[in-house]
Amino acid sequence: MAQERIVAVGLLTTRDLDRLGEGFKRCFPVSDDGKFEDLLKAIDEADSAAELRKSRSDGSGTPARA
């Protein structure tokens, strides 16, 4: 049997998983022990930087909201 190719990795809340429903089966829980704080901070900083770059490029001067 051929392995399925991974196309995305995501960080989801319990609410996100509830919305995805029973069809979403490949979930690996992450403990809430602070081991991922550096990663989460880096993701937040990258998101903020991307929003700032977008706001500068579209000329609005304020970060765009999704």
Image (cartoon, grey):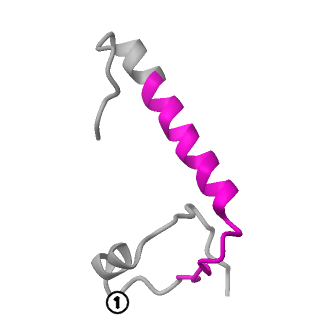
Tell me the quarter of the picture where residue 33 sits: bottom right
Most extreme residue toward the top is: 59
| Label 1, residues with CA under 10 Å away: few <14, some 14-19, many ≥20 | few
Circle 1 sits in a helix, a strand or a loop, which is it?
loop
Say which residue appears at 39% left-offset and 79% top-offset.
14
The answer to which of 21 and 18 lies nearer the viewer is 18
Please, what is the dominant secondary structure of the magenta stretch?
helix
Residue at numbered disc 1: 22
Say which residue appears at 32% left-offset and 21% top-offset.
62
Q: Position of residue 11 (x, y in %)?
A: 51, 66
- Left/right placement of residue 36 relative to residue 58 reads right
- Left/right placement of residue 49 relative to residue 39 reads left
The answer to which of 7 and 1 lies nearer the viewer is 7
Q: Position of residue 42 (x, y in %)?
A: 63, 46
Q: Which residues are magenta?
A: 27-52
Number of numbered callouts drawn: 1
* Residue 28 is inside the magenta segment: yes
The answer to which of 17 and 4 lies nearer the viewer is 17
Q: Amino acid at mark 1?
A: Glu
Q: Is residue 37 above or below residue 48?
A: below
* Residue 11 is inside the magenta segment: no
